[in-house]
Image: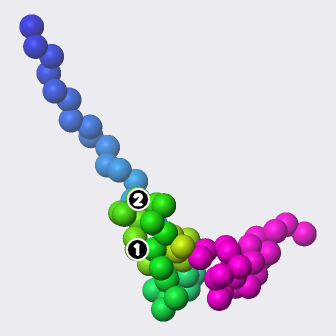
Amino acid sequence: MRGSARTPTHRAVPSWRAPKEAAEAADAEDRFRHRPCYIFNTALKSNLNDEACSHCRYYLTASCPHIDEFIDDVEDLTPE
């Protein structure tokens, strides 16, 4: 006897952000992308080559010309 295939009757919950939050998140993400100093870190998988600073060879090193921005960004997240 074969079992019947069941189709879910509920819909997936859409991911929703308020327009202002979505714009702020996009701005924050773009802030650390597509910089002219970007050099892909070859220790990572090639599918991660999206020009994000976190995938750069110099990310969080003394060779990074923007390290002060990353440190400032982390300090903003530190609880007081």
Q: Which residues are magenta?
A: 58-80
Question: Is residue 19 visible in the rendered structure shown here?
Answer: no
Residue 65 place in picture, x, y as percent: 65, 88
Dot 2, how many residues are within 10 Å of its Cα: few (below 14), some (14-19), or many (20+)? few
The residue carrying mark 2 is 45
Q: Quadrant of the C terminus?
A: bottom right
Q: Specify whether residue 30 is painted magenta.
A: no
Mark in front: 2 vs 1: 2
In the image, what residue occupies the spot 9% across and 7% down? Answer: 1
For numbered disc 1, what is the local secondary structure?
A: loop
Q: Amino acid at mark 1?
A: Asp
Residue 68 place in picture, x, y as percent: 73, 85
In the image, what residue occupies the spot 45% across and 66% down? Answer: 42
In the image, what residue occupies the spot 49% across and 83% down? Answer: 38
The residue carrying mark 1 is 50
For numbered disc 2, what is the local secondary structure?
A: loop
Per the model, the C-alpha gap separating discs 2 and 1 is: 11 Å
Q: In the rendered image, which quarter is residue 4 located in?
A: top left
Coloring applied to the structure: rainbow
**In this rendering, position of residue 43 left or right of residue 77:** left
